[in-house]
Image: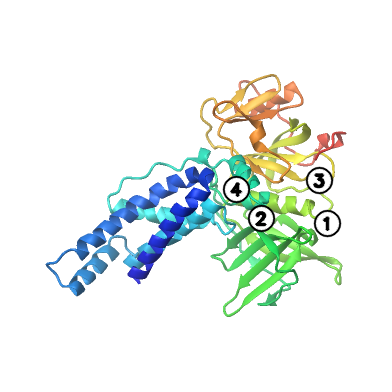
Amino acid sequence: MVISRLHDTSRLLRDLADRSQLHLPQVPVIVDYLNVILPCLSLTLRDIMQYYEDKTKTKEIRWRTMWNDMSNELPGTTLPDRFLYYNQFLELLLYMLTRNPNFDMNAMEEIRLHILRLRDVRGIDPPSPIRPRLARRDTALDFWGQEAYSHWAEAIFTQPMPSRREFRKRGSSDAYGPLYKLGFNPVSDNVKVLVKRSFDNDRVSVTMFLREADQLPFVFIRMHTASETWYNILPINVLTIERESSSVLYLAYWNAAERRKKAWASLSFLTWEELVLFYCTFASLKIRSPLPNVHSTRKPKVGREKRLFQAQIVEDNYHHCLMVFEDYRTKGRRLHVRALGGAFFGSPIWTAFLPTEPYEEWLIHKGPTRIWIRDLIVYSFCDEYSPHQQRRGKNGAFQIKFVQTAAATRFKQLFNPISTPSVESASEESEDEDSSSHSDE
């Protein structure tokens, strides 16, 4: 078993080296993660060689001694298990490098922490911290734009997140049906997977994909039971999404026979950031679906968030609505921009999660209506918007241009209060700017 997993490790390392040549812009993102695993993997291989080259013992004694000694270094982790962790981590690095939709940040973080524990018991110094500034979303999207048949949604979950605010209490994940057995597939085979997320140790998984023929987005759900696997697929335009509790998003569909909404799935997220990204991705795909939305009239709103600020900004010659939200449960803050008008009215344009303790000069008031924010990682929810066009200066600060001077001042005071800031009401009901005559893309 150890030998076969060693072969897998070798294959994965070669694959990483080869694919790095094809995905050069993404290489800096994985370097810090390689620094987590490579010293530990290298020491493991050197130790194996020392046992193997000890000619004072028979081959069987050498093997048994190596197995027992190295399996006892970290309780609960045998030598084969150690290579299993290494290989899973390397495979996730491949997914990160190639922006594969199967990349799972939660799994990556769990294995990273396990490897750090192994490093600690083996006396290896801690690695350098993961640098969030390398995980720039707009850079990833620029690279996607160079590849054929790319889609903005493929880049949402394929890079490290700048922060991870975990929910203390989590709900359950379930699929409610109607569910079907293996073989149910009402769409053509020519599809493009955009996002895949797993829940409850992969007992439930949700995949968003496009049918290539008409670019219609679908949602595919899969659930394992004790003895069987069940599936269902629905067009995204017939589904609704709501935040049922702090950590749970609730999907429902319209049952025409019963003339009411019925539960389709509940999805419990580990972190607030993932919940927000999933919600915004779903909402944008639904609004931009070629088919009309079924029984959904209100603008997308994550819910259970307090709005601290709201104003109009100008991006790419369009007027958008910028809001600052604070999550009631995790107290995390984020910027959220949505369309003010046009065919995609209310659709999320981008969001960015704000640091808990910003460093000095993180936010700079550059002009009467211009604010620069450094190290801001922007998650874009449409192809029409180009985050890199808002970058300024040698460090790539993100510029926000307000329509009114007073709005820029209030925004700066929200994060760097000198006197009592004049912040808009936290009420989630007021939408004054929606009456604007500006149209969006």
Q: Earlier in the sequence, mark 4 or mark 1?
A: 4
Which is closer to the viewer, label 2 or label 1?
1
Helix, strand or loop at disc 4?
helix
- What residue would you read off at disc 2? 245
Q: Are marks 2 and 4 in contact (CB under 8 Å)?
A: no
Mark 4 and mark 3: span between their CA atoms?
A: 24 Å
Q: Earlier in the sequence, mark 4 or mark 3?
A: 4
Q: Earlier in the sequence, mark 2 or mark 3?
A: 2
Which is closer to the viewer, label 4 or label 1?
1
Mark 2 and mark 3: span between their CA atoms?
A: 27 Å
Q: Are marks 2 and 3 in contact (CB under 8 Å)?
A: no
Q: Quadrant of the N terminus?
A: bottom left
Q: Quadrant of the C terminus?
A: top right
Q: Which mark is residue 293?
A: 1
* Few, some or many residues within 10 Å of mark 1 (<14, 14–19, 20+): some
Which is closer to the viewer, label 2 or label 4?
4
Q: Which mark is residue 273?
A: 4
* Few, some or many residues within 10 Å of mark 3 (<14, 14–19, 20+): some
Tell me the amino acid under the disc marked 2.
Answer: Ser
Q: How many marks?
A: 4
Tell me the amino acid under the disc marked 4.
Answer: Glu
Tell me the amino acid under the disc marked 1.
Answer: Asn
Side of 377 relative to 56 (left or right): right
- What residue would you read off at disc 3? 344
Q: Earlier in the sequence, mark 2 or mark 4?
A: 2
**Residue sitting at x 45%, y 61%:** 88
The answer to which quarter of the image holds residue 184 is: bottom right
